[in-house]
Image (cartoon, rainbow, N blue to C red):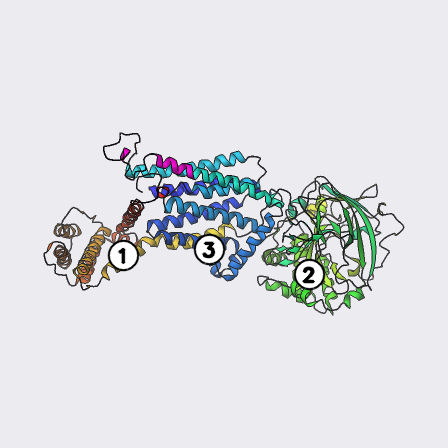
Amino acid sequence: MSGHGRLALCAYAATLMAACSMLPLVDPVGWMGQAAFLLAVQCGVGALGRRVPLPRLLTVAAQMLVTLMLLTVAFAREQAPAGFLPGPQAVRLLVDLLSAGADDVGRYAIPAPATAGIRLMLVGGVLLVGLAVDVLAVTFRSAAPAGLPLLALYSVAAGLSDGGADWLWFLLAACGYLLLLLAEGRERLSQWGRVFSGATRPRGGPAGGDLSGGGALAPVRTGRRIGALALGVALAVPAALPALDSGLLAGNGAGNGRGGGGGTISAVNPLVSLQNNLNQPENRQVMSYRTNSNSPQDFYLRILALDQFNGNEWRASTRRLKDVPKRLPSPGGLSPEVAVTEISSNISASPSYRQTYLPLPYPATEVRVGGHWRYESEGRTLVGDDGETTKGAQYEVSSLVVQPTSGQLADAGPAPAALRREYTQVPDSLPKVVRETADEVTRGARNAYEQAVKLQDYFASDGGFTYDTSVNSGTGSAAIGRFLKDKEGFCVHFSFTMAAMARTLGIPARVAIGFTPGTAQSDGSMSVGLRDAHAWPELYFEGIGWTRFEPTPTRGTAPSYTLPDAPSGDPADPARPETGASAAVPAAPSASDSCPPQLRKQGECGSAVASGAVGPTDSGTPTGTVLGVVLLVLLVLLLPSLPMLWRIRARARRLSFSAGRTPGDAAARTLAAWREITDTAWDHGIVPDESLTPRKAAARIVRLGQLGSDGAEAVHRVAGAVEQVLYAPEPRPGTGLSEDVQAVRTALRASVGRSTRLRAVVAPRSTVRVVWAASDRRAALTARWRMPRRPTWLRRPSHQEG
């Protein structure tokens, strides 16, 4: 392997070793394999650019372009023209994902889920650092400064982690940097010989052959400067990071607002591993509560609502946070004509339950809780501030039980224009089958209420859907299309699909995340377990406000206003004190025929179980797709054709010289023609001998190539023209040089076999000149940097060239 290749490989390894420090921050760690593969392609493009050779800036530009294409294939392939070109929609999606990733980083505790946004930040960060290391260490041959981006990568990881094994990651990153330095030193020594220090100073000259006057102390001074700068970065970056005191950045997930009404709620997706929790054998309790409601089966504990759907995931909007008022404002859109009853509940969160959002019955009217909490009015949620979480929290909540009649829902007027515009948006990537199915299912409905009930019944009973927690938990447009086709999924699929279908019908919709009522205990309290977490759609009706629906079969309970001829009972007993025990209710509804076998075996059919947190996005672009697109374009098409393309370009450039008006122009044209004959003979197996005169070299080509009379005469004519421009007192420019070159090429092709002709075209031997050209350019650049009167701080740490 060449010195360039070894150095590039070491730069790749050093970047990956430093990136390992990010592994404890996110779970699962599958992003690392994707980053390693994309980084290898990026480094390969740089190696090809240097081998051609392209100008250094053009090589860097090519790597940047390929990096953007790789990220497009991995994260925005569906929006990209041809699947890999970074068009406007693809770039917009990447920007949205980066924004979402920044919000997720500010919200989740370590280890954070590998959401699409966080994965893009991780993979993109590794690629950017890898590009910086490759450019500094390999393209510009300065391995020492390449340690700074490696240090930045490690410092970010160290500032975010809890410090459990920082020394191990530091040791790994340091080993990668040392490997890079050793590789550069080895290449320098292999080209220029070993440098000895401490030799006696020659009279009148610098010691040790130091031509710049810097002495042996120059590398030491440079090393000290780099070390001081690296130490500053290492101290400054972790010191600054704790100021970002939320979620992953502080290990707690707190909000970031302080003071009177400031701060925002990040657009976070709280769905973290719901599918895994649904399949857990133990339904660990996360909270318990007592309520004076007579209908605890409708007592859903709501965390927040996801109101934005970008085609890749559902997520909550960025909202302004306020101080928690003594009494929360009246719910938006609720008319005084709708019957409501206020109930009281006492809720206790388990010490093991740590959540940034406070679970509340909807709509809450008053919350009495200790600690630092902020209020978001649109979603009527409470968000922990300054590190506050639900861990061990005990709080009292007053809330409303809204009892609309079917007539009131059917007669609901149109929603406000601004609300309708925001909550009926669907992405262009949503499959057509979603809108078509919604139209087909709701055919014959006279109003939005009847459409909503038909959608709920379609999923819950009429459409042949099966509740199954073993399917892929994607939540994007593709997952919705798969769900409608396969008709298998769990609450995430049911709620997200119904909300999307409602939006296509013009009904404002969003998805609520929280817990179903749980299980009644012998002491009158209700126990909410990990698998009671749930997702359900909320649809807006003017005069009633946001209204819960339940499309998921065997989970939760359908609201009474969606059932035919449902009696309305008193939801609460006003005489019961706030701290009184709840009324006894069935622990679960009866088992459904649609209950899957695996849940029936566990005895869970009919129980109000659900989940705890869900993987937010589709699983992303498979590695096989990336392999198929990138390798097909870069390896199958581009790489094998590079030598041939360079040779064609060189031949066209040499033969396009005009005679010009000066003797120099004529000489350049003649020498270019001779170089083309030499390279053509080399491509056909005749290695050039630079020690021969043009006349003897021509005779050698004729002899070894077994050229006929036409070819031999053409070679000798060009050789004679070369002697004229090199040695004659008054050079006479040759004529017909292009025709002579073509005659020699034709004669050489006729004198060799088919395989040699094919190799001369596809893999010409003379392309090794690109390596020689790279060496010459590097030597010229080194000589320019070694010019006198240069400031001392600009000198390279070693006085060896290369």
Contact (Cβ within 8 Å) of mark 3 with mark 2:
no
Residue pointed to by mark 1:
650
Q: What residue type is labelled 1?
A: Ala
Left of 337 or right of it: where is 74? left
Q: Which amino acid does label 3 sit on?
A: Met
For image coordinates 86% across by 56% down, the residue present is 569
Disc number for residue 40: none
Q: Which amino acid does label 2 sit on?
A: Ala
Q: Is mark 2 on a helix, strand or loop?
A: strand
Contact (Cβ within 8 Å) of mark 2 with mark 1:
no
- Residue 81 vs residue 360, the one in the foreground: 360
Q: Please say whether residue 721 is one of the residues in the magenta stretch.
A: no
Disc number for residue 69: 3
For image coordinates 62% across by 46% down, the residue present is 246
In the picture, the quarter occupied by the N terminus is: top left
Residue pointed to by mark 2:
509
Please indicate, yes or no, whether residue 28 appears anywhere in the rendered image.
no
